[in-house]
């Protein structure tokens, strides 16, 4: 049995031993939250797709380039 299988079996046994309904509700809520699927608006999905395409095309900036950009932008904003 793998580590994951043992862990699951242990959790199943522990769940079966719980009689506190409130605790079971909390566990169920936690599991449901983990299963939540994010839904993006069409506009956000389009922006993400554009950004991914730009990345694939090499249209990216290094961290150093962005630092210089922001340093310049902040200096201009303060003036």
Image (cartoon, rainbow, N blue to C red):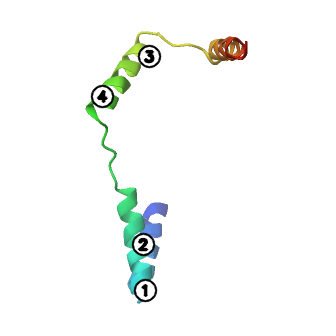
- In the rendered image, the residue lying farthest to the bottom is 19
Say few, some or many: other residues with alpha carbon within 10 Å of mark 2 (under 14 / 14 to 19 / 20 or more): few
The Cα atoms of the two marked residues, 1 and 2, are separated by 11 Å
- In the rendered image, the residue lying farthest to the left is 42
Q: Is residue 62 above or below residue 1?
A: above
Name the residue that disc number 2 marks: 27
The Cα atoms of the two marked residues, 3 and 2, are separated by 40 Å
The Cα atoms of the two marked residues, 3 and 1, are separated by 50 Å
Decide which of tag 4 and tag 1 comes sooner along the chain: 1
Query: Dividing the image into 4 quarters, which one contains the N terminus?
Result: bottom left
Decide which of tag 2 and tag 4 comes sooner along the chain: 2
Name the residue that disc number 3 marks: 55
Name the residue that disc number 1 marks: 18
Q: Is residue 45 visible?
A: yes
Q: Is residue 54 above or below residue 37?
A: above
Query: Dividing the image into 4 quarters, which one contains the C terminus?
Result: top right
The Cα atoms of the two marked residues, 2 and 4, are separated by 35 Å
Quadrant of the image occupied by residue 28? bottom left
Name the residue that disc number 4 marks: 43
The reply, left or right, for residue 34 in relation to residue 74 is: left
Element assignment for label 4: helix
Residue 4's spot in the image, x, y percent?
A: 45, 61
Quadrant of the image occupied by residue 62? top right
Q: Compare residues 55 and 15 and report the one nearer the observer.
A: 55
């Amino acid at each position: 049995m793998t580590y994951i299988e043992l862990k699951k079996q242990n959790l199943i046994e522990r769940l079966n031993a719980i009689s506190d309904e409130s605790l079971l509700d909390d566990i169920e809520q936690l599991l449901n939250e983990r299963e939540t699927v994010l839904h993006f608006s069409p506009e956000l999905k389009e922006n993400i797709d554009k950004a991914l395409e730009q990345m694939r095309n090499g249209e990216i900036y290094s961290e150093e380039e962005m630092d210089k950009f922001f340093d310049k932008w902040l200096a201009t904003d303060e003036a």
